[in-house]
Amino acid sequence: MALPPVYLSLDAAMSPKITVELLRQLRQAMRNTKYIAEPIQAYIVPSGDAHQSEYIAPCDCRREFICGFNGSAGTAIVTEKHAAMWTDGRYFLQASQQMDNNWTLMKMGLKETLSQEDWLISVLPENSTVGVDPWIIAADQWKNMSKALASAGHSLVAVQDNLIDAIWMDRPTRPSTQLLTLGLGFTGLTWQDKMTALRSKMAERKISWFVATALDEIAWLFNLRGSDIEYNPVFFAYAIVGMNTIRLFVDIKRLAVPTVREHLQLDTPSKVELSIQTAPYESVFTELQAVCASLGPKEKVWISDKASCALMQVIPKTHRSPIPYTPLCLAKAVKNATEIQGMKMAHIKDAVALCELFAWLEKEIPKGTVTEISAADKAEELRSQQKDFVGLSFPSISSVGPNGAIIHYRPLPETNRTLSLNEIYLLDSGAQYIDGTTDVTRTMHFGSPSAYEKETFTYVLKGHIAVSAAIFPNGTKGHLLDSFARQALWESGLDYLHGTGHGVGCFLNVHEGPCGISYKTFADEPLEAGMIVSDEPGYYEDGLFGIRIENVVLVVPAKPKYNYRNKGSLTFEPLTLVPIQAKMVNTDLLTQKERDWVNEYHRQCRETIGAELERQGRKEAMDWLIRETQPIA
Amino acid sequence: MALPPVYLSLDAAMSPKITVELLRQLRQAMRNTKYIAEPIQAYIVPSGDAHQSEYIAPCDCRREFICGFNGSAGTAIVTEKHAAMWTDGRYFLQASQQMDNNWTLMKMGLKETLSQEDWLISVLPENSTVGVDPWIIAADQWKNMSKALASAGHSLVAVQDNLIDAIWMDRPTRPSTQLLTLGLGFTGLTWQDKMTALRSKMAERKISWFVATALDEIAWLFNLRGSDIEYNPVFFAYAIVGMNTIRLFVDIKRLAVPTVREHLQLDTPSKVELSIQTAPYESVFTELQAVCASLGPKEKVWISDKASCALMQVIPKTHRSPIPYTPLCLAKAVKNATEIQGMKMAHIKDAVALCELFAWLEKEIPKGTVTEISAADKAEELRSQQKDFVGLSFPSISSVGPNGAIIHYRPLPETNRTLSLNEIYLLDSGAQYIDGTTDVTRTMHFGSPSAYEKETFTYVLKGHIAVSAAIFPNGTKGHLLDSFARQALWESGLDYLHGTGHGVGCFLNVHEGPCGISYKTFADEPLEAGMIVSDEPGYYEDGLFGIRIENVVLVVPAKPKYNYRNKGSLTFEPLTLVPIQAKMVNTDLLTQKERDWVNEYHRQCRETIGAELERQGRKEAMDWLIRETQPIA
């Protein structure tokens, strides 16, 4: 699934949300001393939740509630007279269609667009107060905003009661789904082992406490999963870990289940320091206050620098040690042997479903009855037949012809195109299985692709191979590999405006840190054997078609001829084993090495997926696989 | 010339400087109320000058004076009881040889080495005061140090009189060499044009004043050159530019020369706003104070964030607008047609000298009389015969066999090896001509290279070609090209521990910002047509040999088949035209495209340099050129 998303918007017919009354109520709340001691002149509504999750639960869709815009990124600000919403190029059209004329769309990335800070300074009366819910603004964002406002004589204040919640009458309740316990056969490490490893990292850096705020880190640490957020098997929780203490903050009701109690050893802890104290989700604030009140003069508390401002500020500055990547984030990224085995199994099952899908599509498309939506539904149906299927790992991007050029397209009834023999079909989809998470993109033509389509597909394939087959020294950061994916496109004057790869969780979030492959030089951590990332270059011709070839790949040791300074080398092993359509390839443009790579990849697909198709008795898919994995010349 | 230097030290026999008495005097000065109101407990001696120059004049070598270590990077700190000096891996050996046992060598980059801040905190008594000369510490460094010390209860203070100067009896005077005026034929733009362009950038960003502190920027702006610092044709100066004012701060004696007075129109300014007010170098502080005192409430002053703390702090915070790259730095980096023409001419002359040198070496080496030093001297002599030669652009790296593996090697009598038929010779050298600056590395074998030497040379060549022939979109930053230079080495498990390229000035510093090609993701600016950088991958086998192939290349528009989103593409054109030794190449390892590149490059060398050799009547060099540019199969 392409990351980071960049520029195109969902071209759908939508009617705007009417917000006159809501804005009136919100402005009233901004003056209501029930919520704030003094009236505030502006209120910021960010789009995240208290855990800075990429996907959020319905109860956290506050920005959508107030302005109508439901894209994944955007910040609304309401003043006494104005209402404005900032979003990026992907969403300009969608936002303009979903918001009524009480709202000004602030197009981020355009030169003439003011930043939130500059806009506030330009519209606010002197000495204004700007409010924000400190739980849903990240600590670093708070800091920047606060500084900018202060420099112009205004102040940023934390409003403890969320003012959107105050006027949101039918706000959904926070989900509290059943927790799933994962045994050693899936995790490879008990939560006790993980806790011990975390504590040894803390001891190494002389850290007394660690506050876990990211939902996937907490799920990973305790070997638990939930379904509070669609596509992401996580649950709302916090954890505070000391050298002899573990506090888990979660809806207490969820812990009544005997399997969960037993898994966490709530009733019979094996050791004192592995005894978990549970407390309600909401009590994390007061409990962290209590922890901080008892800190010795030199004690330090680790917390992610992306944690909420509310929690960050509980920790006195002298004790605070904010970090870009927590030890859990780093440990979670390097998969152990059991997780790797699980990811391989999940990818085999996923490939079975896709082979079956593509064989079915070949038969059905000529009838003119398959649409983007029905194809995606069929893919989900076939995946759901596989063992330990849990759900999709993100909304399927099922796109025909011009829709394929919309990088984060999601088919809607208004945009739904029919698959045909004349247009390219791009399917970017994935699933959650109890043993692993998948994410795969294949681009196919069911008729005769044009020379240009084949040419550009082949450049994308060359880029895909260049990354997948790259050998590089231990310690290399993923961003250094990004240009390999673009070299063939660049040589012909082409490019794509998204990154090349993202970290993938193991039965966890399909996007995870701290590694990735992107031209954006964010603070990515070096690649290590056991990390899992996507390799997904693309090419998009606006109004015509989109091409993307995506495999999930595992970082593995490589053994080249030499070993400079004993540093060792790494390369990638594809976990995704779904044939790449040879019909789309202009083989004249491939080097012999690239042809060999394709043939060896297809040999592996045939061998590994063939065996599983045979076991499952899926004859048609098997025939399709055999045909699609013939060696290319 | 390899940038950034990384790890190896000059393996030379040196005796340490005896510093007992000097340290006693410095510690006395640290308590002397003649210099400071209250005694200070530590004094920091950075290695830079007031302009953060890479190369410094003898009068600014204060760190060397106090501790004996004369490498290019290092910071000394003296407390009442301790003296410590921080430097990086290149210099561990050299520093340990040059410093006596009053000094502790702090090896940067090793895990166990404390940072300057942490070390100070660990050794200082409570509530200590640490002093530093605010003129030679950059504003951002001051900020970090000050913050770290404050968090531990100490304070950083500016000591206006430099305490090293106070005890340095025979300190050389600041150089004040004759100024050279450059006409339109060399610069392409008058200083008046440059001033107007600068002011239009200022107007665009609503900036009232600009403070120029970098010596190469001031030289470029006024079309003047000096020779105050070895290898760098700059002169000590500051400039303050307003919309109607130009103030140039320079040793006034230098302006007595009629050509300089006329060039700057000091006596007959054409327009009021182009009239230059000159003032003594030292008066920049008080003049900037005066400018700042008269600022309107919203007026902003541009200054480099790498300017000295002293000047930065003169500007009140509300008026300060620090920038990573000044408009002069950006304008200087994009060479105009005249500068490009000059650079081409300079490279032709430089290639003539090198062809002559290599032809001479072939004849002389078998006699056993040529050493690293004499070869470097011969290169200088041959260059000096060329028109408009000014001097070298950096100390020649002339290295035989194992010395070649020392990336920033400089031959000394103690290390001087004799060139032979058995060892690889690496020469990295360059010159300043009035029309341009050169920097070229060639690696040659005058006997029979081993298969391994040829293999690794060929990987380096493949990397050199991959960068030089790369096509990439407009707006691409140089660091995205760095991996292209390493791909062939990485595939065999090899690598090199320095960047791939640096910006090159036009009759200015051989290292300049804001562009470069490096795996270090510093804030480099996107490459643009007209920029000039080096392309210099290498491979170093400790104790055996070093290989580097370096050309200076010009960024030029490319015209690939397509033009994605009308962005346009770029590529490189080599300015350096010196044959690459075919004997060192294992042609089996080259692709057809790479062989074509080599043959086309050699065709250009033969055509362009051949014509000039003919014109200069250099018959032996011509024969050598013809032989060395035979097409490879």
Image: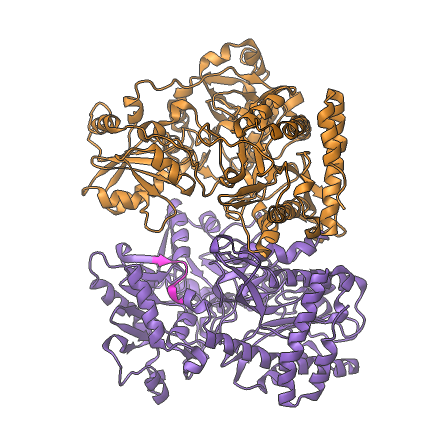
Chain colours: A orange, B purple
Q: In the image shown, does A356 or B220 lie closer to the viewer?
A: A356
Residue B339, x across and y down, in percent: 47, 75
Let me know if residue B3 appears in the view: yes
Magenta span contains residue A125: no
Residue A8, x across and y down, in percent: 45, 41
**Quadrant position of residue A631:** top right
Q: From the viewer's perspective, is B589 left or right of A84?
A: right
Residue A217, x across and y down, in percent: 52, 29
Which quadrant of the figure contains the C terminus of chain B? Answer: bottom right
> Who's the residue at 34% across and 68% down the image?
B198
Let me know if residue A74 appears in the view: no
Residue A599, x across and y down, in percent: 75, 42
Which quadrant of the figure contains the N terminus of chain B? Answer: bottom right
- Vertical arrangement, residue A521 with respect to residue A320, above or below: below
How many numbered dots are placed on residues in this image?
Answer: 0
- Vertical arrangement, residue A319 with respect to residue A352, above or below: below
Magenta span contains residue B325: yes
> Who's the residue at 36% across and 85% down the image?
B260
Q: From the viewer's perspective, is A307 left or right of B36?
A: right
Return the residue found at the far front: A367
Residue range (magenta): B322-328
Q: In the image shown, does B92 or A116 lie closer to the viewer?
A: A116
**Quadrant position of residue B44:** bottom left
